[in-house]
Image: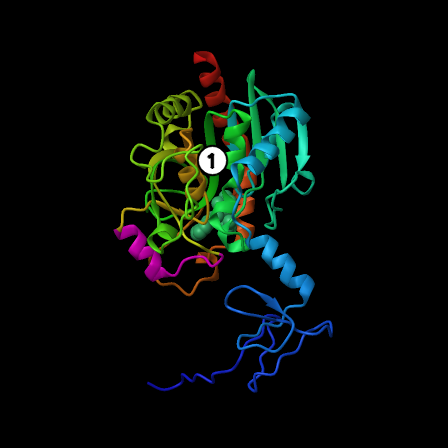
């Protein structure tokens, strides 16, 4: 084999490459070192990284993944007291689907940065606001912006807001996402009601439930069969008929990869062989966390792009976040109608 070389260069955290291993930092502040035990030492050590003290603290905060029950309770109390509402339905808005929160009546809006101990949204199309109010007469709360593993947050932190929802009183989780359609029958703009998932991050040994289990949330070993509530799926199918969109609504299997890269052709082929219909980078950790604390789950994917399993040189065949956002914007009205009608159905039987 020719044409491949490995130079053994040392990559620094600020992206600079330096074959000698000497480290530089952009702003001129002195690099610090840390030990494998996580100690933050300023002396030279066996393992080095070129973070300043402030950067180190920021990264540490981002990676913090232990949220004791009491901290989550405090966040929930802050939201319930601040809004004067105890929500029954929690909605997570997928990429470009923030309008699902805009249809909430009498909204009380909490910016994520103003909520104590809450992470911040870093992805375009995820505004970073919690909206609490009513929809079709039901008390609801919606996350206009979710957290993804690729943003640098551990999975437990990505799905911590689901536990906040639970302690606010939420019984039903509606999780929505933008996803690539692997099933060749799916078209851009279709909706896939999730009836199961393949947890690729779980295959790699990663779970939002990793670490000590607090039985106040749920059991150490939760079962995940029947995670996606069948009654809600059937109600959504009925609603899609009355909306005249049943031919573009499917029931299928979603898989979450870590991202932020979109998939290679070989990965897409492997996923298809595993029975996956749509792929994204979210939702599964939220569903796991919701099922762990016994919430009823309804989830759907808006198919924002087709994932071809054929090799192609055409730029148009590559997934892009711009396309994802544009399709989501186009289909937001339909998604809003589906969600509000399903909320109305739940409210009817309450
Ligand atoms: O799953 P949501 O948040 O809808 O977003 C999807 O869209 C982004 C990629 O375009 C990824 O974040 C992927 O997970």
Quarter of the picture containing the N terminus is bottom left
Q: Is residue 96 left or right of residue 306?
A: right
Residue at (33% x, 37% y) in the render: 222
Residue stretch rendered in magenta on the structure: 260-273
Number of numbered labels in the structure image: 1
Q: Is residue 312 shown above or below 43?
A: above
Q: Position of residue 82 (x, y in %)?
A: 68, 27
Q: Which residue is mark 1?
A: 175
Check disc 1 and report its element: helix, strand or loop.
strand
Residue 92 visible in the shown view: no
Residue at (52% x, 47% y) in the render: 66
Residue at (56% x, 83% y) in the render: 21
Q: Position of residue 302 (x, y in %)?
A: 45, 39
Q: Position of residue 213 (x, y in %)?
A: 41, 41
Q: Is residue 237 magenta?
A: no
Quarter of the picture containing the C terminus is top left
Q: Is residue 175 shown above or below 34?
A: above
Hey, which quadrant is residue 125 in on the image?
A: top right
* Viewer-closest of 10 and 175: 10
As drawn, the residue found furthest toward the right would be 28
């Amino acid at each position: 084999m020719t044409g491949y070389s490995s130079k053994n260069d040392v990559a620094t955290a600020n992206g600079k490459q330096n074959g000698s291993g000497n480290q530089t930092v952009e702003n001129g502040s002195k690099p610090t070192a840390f030990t494998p035990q996580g100690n933050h030492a300023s002396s030279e050590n066996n393992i080095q990284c070129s973070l300043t003290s402030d950067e180190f603290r920021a990264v540490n905060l981002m990676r913090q993944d232990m949220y004791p029950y009491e901290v989550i309770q405090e966040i929930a109390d802050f939201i319930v007291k601040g809004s004067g509402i105890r929500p029954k339905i929690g909605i997570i808005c997928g990429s470009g689907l923030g309008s699902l929160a805009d249809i909430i009546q009498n909204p009380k809006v909490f910016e994520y940065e103003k909520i104590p101990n809450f992470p911040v949204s870093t992805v375009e199309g995820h505004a970073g606001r919690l909206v609490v109010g009513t929809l079709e007469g039901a008390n609801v709360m919606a996350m206009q912006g979710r957290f993804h593993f690729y943003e640098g947050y551990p999975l437990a932190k990505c799905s911590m807001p689901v536990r906040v929802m639970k302690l606010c009183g939420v019984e039903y989780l509606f999780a929505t996402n933008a996803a690539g359609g692997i099933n060749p029958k799916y078209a851009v703009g279709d909706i896939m009601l999730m009836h199961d998932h393949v947890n690729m991050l779980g295959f790699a040994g990663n779970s939002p439930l990793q670490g000590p289990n607090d039985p106040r949330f749920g059991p150490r070993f939760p079962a995940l069969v029947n995670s996606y509530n069948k009654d809600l799926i059937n109600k959504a199918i009925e609603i899609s008929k009355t909306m005249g969109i049943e031919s573009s609504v499917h029931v299928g299997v979603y898989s979450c990869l870590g991202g932020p890269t979109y998939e290679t052709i070989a990965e897409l082929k492997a996923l298809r062989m595993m029975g996956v219909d749509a792929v994204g980078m979210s939702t599964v950790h939220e569903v796991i966390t919701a099922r762990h604390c016994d919430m009823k789950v309804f989830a759907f994917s808006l198919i924002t792009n087709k994932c071809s399993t054929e090799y192609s040189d055409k730029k148009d065949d590559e997934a892009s976040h711009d396309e994802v956002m544009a399709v989501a914007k186009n289909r937001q009205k339909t998604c809003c109608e589906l969600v509000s009608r399903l909320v109305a159905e739940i409210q009817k039987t309450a």
